[in-house]
Image (cartoon, rainbow, N blue to C red):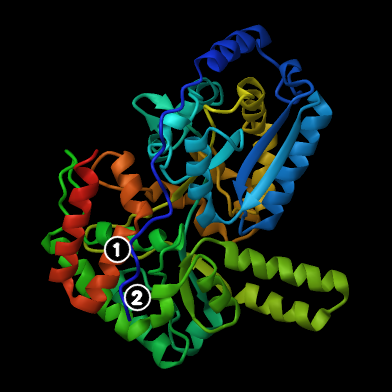
Amino acid sequence: MATPDRNSSAGSGRAVSRRTVLKSVAGALAAAGSFAWDKAPAIAQQREIHFLLNSNFRPLFDVEIRKLAADYAKLGGVKVTTEFITNNDVPGRLTAAIESGQGMDLSVVQWNQAHIFADGLTDVSDIVAATGGGKIYPWLRAANEVDGVFRAYPWYVLCSGMTYNKAMCDKLGIVRFPDTYEELLVAGKKMKQAGTPVGWCLGHTNGDGAFGNYPIFWNFGAMEVDEKGRVAINSKEARMAIEWMRQFWADACDESGMGWDDTSNNRAFLAEQIACAYNPSSIYLYARSEAKADRDKGDLKTAEHWDTLANNTRHTLGPKGPAGRWHLNQPVNFGILRASPNQAAAKEFMRWLVARPQWERCFLAGGGFEQGNSPEWEKQPLWDADPIIAPFAHIPQYGRNLGYKGPYNRASAEAQSKYIIADTLARGIQEGPDAALQWAEHELQLVYSRA
C-alpha cells in the first residue's frame, strides 16, 4: 500500500493590518462597559456577523448553537449566521479568509492552529480572563496563547479513548479490556482472527489521524522534539514504538485504516465490522440517538438493534506504555478574524456565547462528546447519569501537547497539519523503523527550522 500523501490542507496565516478598525473597536468596547451574561449588549444592535464552524459528530450540539444564535438575535438584534462545514475543510477556509481579508467574522480554530493563524486573529485575552481563564487546562491554554496573547478562545475539548464491543470481546474470552499496549496486541490478535479486527486510523484526517498515534510515541518514551525544540524523533524509544505498531498492524488491525477519515472507524464499528477503535464517544452517542429516533417513528425492531449495540459499547482509557499513559486531546477553539469589519459585534457575541449559561446548554446538548475547558466540567452530573461514557470525564487530565516535549507552537501545529506522526507510523509499517525515522527526522527538521 502506498505511503499516504503528506501534503496538508492547512496553510500559514498572513498579517492583516486593520488599524482604523481596531481603533474604533477599542473605543466602542470601552463605551459598552459590562453587561449581564443573559443579555445581548446594546453595541450589537442591528448588526450581522458570520460564524464558521465544523459540523459536529454530535449533531445536537450544532442544533443548540443555531438555537443560541437565534436567541442572541432576539436579545440584542444582531443576526448571527452560522455556517457548518466538514472538519477537514476548516483550515483551508480560514487560510483563504485571512489571506484575502474577506469572509467570516468568527471561525472555529482547530488544535493549536491559532499559532499558524495568529497574525490574522484578534486578541481575545480579555474574554479569556473574564471567563476564568486561569482554570483552563494548561495544554488548552497553550494551544491558543501566542507570545502571551490569546488569539482564539479555548472553547471545548474532544477526547478519545478505547471504544469496544463488550459482547464481541466476551465471546473471545476478553473479559477485561487491555490496559497496556502489549495486552492490546494479544487481544487484538484474537479480534482479527475472529474477523472483527481493531479499527485504527492512519489516514490524513483532522482528528483520528492524530488521536491514537501521538500517544504511541509518548507512551513508549519518544518525542518529536526536546525541551529546546531540537528534533529528537530518531531515538530508540521511537523505534520501540514503531516495532510495536508494525506487529499490531499486521496481527490485529483492519489494514484499510491507512486510508480512513474521521468517519471510517465510526461506520465500521456501527456495522459491527470491527471489535474496537480509538475514538471519542461519538459512536456510542450515535447509536443511542438512532435508537430514540426509530422508537419515535414506531420502528421498534430497528430501535432494538441500536439499543443492543449501544448497550454493548464500552469505553476505557487509552493503553499504557513503558513510559506511562498520555492522551492527545483536541482543543476546539474559535477566534475573530482581524479583517472582520464587525470586530465589536463579534467580540461581544463571543463573550456572551462562552459564558456559563450558554456553554452549559452546549455541553448538555453534546451529551459529553464536547467536554468543558477546565476540571470543573469533569464533575458534572451528566457523567454519573451514564456509566458508559463516564470514563471520558477525566481523560483531559492525561493531556499532552502536540510537539511534546517542546513548546506548543506554530511548528508543532504545522507538523500535525502535515500528518508527519501518522505518516511515520505508516512508513514504519511499510519500510521499517530506520527508514521511517530518517524520513521523520528530515521532515521535522524542515518544519522546526522555520520556528
Secondary structure, mark 2, is helix
Seen at 44% across and 87% down, the residue is 173
Circle 2 residues within 10 Å: few <14, some 14–19, many ≥20: some
- Asked whether residue 190 is in view, the answer is yes
Circle 1 residues within 10 Å: few <14, some 14–19, many ≥20: many
Q: Amino acid at mark 2?
A: Leu
Q: Which residue is mark 1?
A: 216
What whole-number distance in Å separates the C-alpha atoms at marks 1 and 2?
12 Å
Picture coordinates of residue 201 (x, y %)? Answer: 42, 70
Picture coordinates of residue 380 (x, y %)? Answer: 61, 45
Q: Which residue is mark 2?
A: 184
Residue 436, image quadrant:
bottom left
Residue 247, image quadrant:
bottom left
How many numbered markers are drawn?
A: 2
Q: 45 or 170: which is nearer to us?
A: 45
Secondary structure, mark 1, is helix
Q: Is residue 152 left or right of residue 64?
A: left
Relative to residue 193, is residue 382 depicted above or below?
A: above
Relative to residue 397, is residue 386 depicted above or below?
A: below
Residue 337, image quadrant:
top right
